[in-house]
Image (cartoon, grey):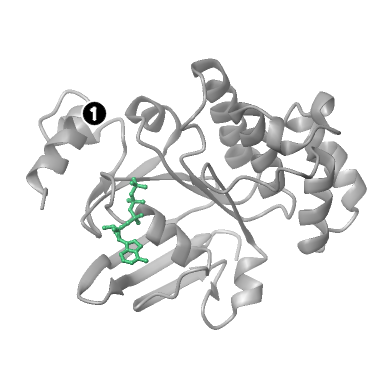
Amino acid sequence: KPSSPVLQVSGLGKRYGERAAVSDVSFEVGRNEIVGLLGPNGAGKTTTLNMVLGVLEPSAGRILIEGFDVQRQRRKALERTNFAAVYAPLPGNLTVYENLRFFGLLYAVRNLARRIETLIEQFDLVRFRDTRCGVLSSGEQTRVCLAKAMLNMPQLLLLDEPTASLDPATARDIRAQIKAIATHGSGGILWTSHNMLEVQEVCDRVLFLSRGRILLQGDPRTLPQQHGEATLDDLFVKLAHANAA
Ligand code: ATP
C-alpha cells in the first residue's frame, strides 16, 4: 500500500484510574511526512508515543502501522517501527559498534555488518566506533541512538525530543539528518520538541496536544497567523494558558 499512511491512530485513550492522560486522539502520519507532536509538559505526548511503540496498553482506540494493528499484529507492526529518545540512552558499557551489533541482532537485521558500516558513516561515528557509549557527549549519544533507530529501516520513526540536550550546531546537524531520512525513505516520522523554531523548520504538520486531547493541527508555518498570533511560540503560550488545569 505505497500511498496509504504509515501510521493511523484513531480514538486513542489512556486512563490511569480516574485520570485521563490521553483522550480520543486521532491522527495520521503519511509517507515522507514529518509530524510534530506539541504540547505543554504533561500533555500526553510521551504516553501517546509509548502506546504507538506497544510498550503501553491503550485504554481505548486503535493504532495501525503500515496497516498492521499494534495490539493484534504486534510483531508485524513493531518490526516496521523504531524510536530514539533522550531519556532512553543505549547501554553505556557497550561500545558504539557493540551497541549497533546488539540491537541489529535483536532486530534480526540482514547483512548486519554492512548495515552497521553504512550507519557509522552516515551518522559520523567512525572515530567513536570502539568508544563506550557511556562516555560519549549528548550529541554523540544522540547520533548513536539515531543510527540504532535506523538499523531495521523503520517505516515509522518516533523521536522524543531528539535535540533537547544538543548545542545549536549539533542540533542543526541532527535536524538535517532527520529531514534526509524523511525525504529519501518511504516512511514517516513522528516527533516531539519544545523548540518552536525547530518545529517550523522541520515539521510538515503539527498536532497540538493539551491535557490529553488534540486542540488543533495544521501547517506550523501558517497556524500562528490563522489564530491571530505572530509566532508559533506565541500560539503555544496562548493555547497552554487557555487550557491550563
Ligand atoms: P513532557 O513534555 O513533560 O515530556 P508529556 O506530554 O510527554 O510531557 P506524558 O509524560 O505523556 O506528558 O504524561 C501525561 C500525563 O499522564 C501526565 O499528567 C502524567 O502525570 C500522567 N502519567 C503518565 N504516566 C503515568 C502513570 N504511570 N501513572 C499515573 N499517571 C501517569
- Give percent across and percent down for residue 41: 28, 45
Is the distance from the Cβ of mark 1 to the nearest ligand 1 atom less than 8 Å? no
Q: Residue at x 33, y 30 (%)?
A: 196
Quadrant in the rendering for residue 63: bottom left
- Residue 225 sits above or below residue 216 on the image: above
- State the quadrant of the N terminus: bottom right
Q: Residue at x 78, y 47 (%)?
A: 99
Residue pointed to by mark 1: 233
- Give percent across and percent down for residue 56: 46, 70
Q: In this view, does 236 lie to the left or right of 65?
A: left
- Residue 33 sits above or below residue 58 on the image: above
Q: Which of 156 and 32 is in front in this view?
A: 156
Residue found farthest to the top:
169
Which class describes the residues within 10 Å of circle 1: few (<14), some (14-19), or many (20+)? some
Q: In this view, does 119 lie to the left or right of 144?
A: right
- Give percent across and percent down for residue 139: 60, 27
- Give percent across and percent down for residue 127: 83, 24
Q: Which residue is drawn at 60% across and 76% down?
A: 74
Quadrant location, ligand no. 1: bottom left
- Residue 226 sits above or below residue 187 on the image: above
Residue found farthest to the bottom:
72
Q: What element carries label 1?
A: helix
Amino acid type at image mark 1: Asp
Quadrant in the rendering for residue 25: bottom left
Q: Is residue 76 left or right of residue 214?
A: right
Q: Residue at x 35, y 25 (%)?
A: 197
Q: Nearer the viewer, residue 235 or 183?
A: 235
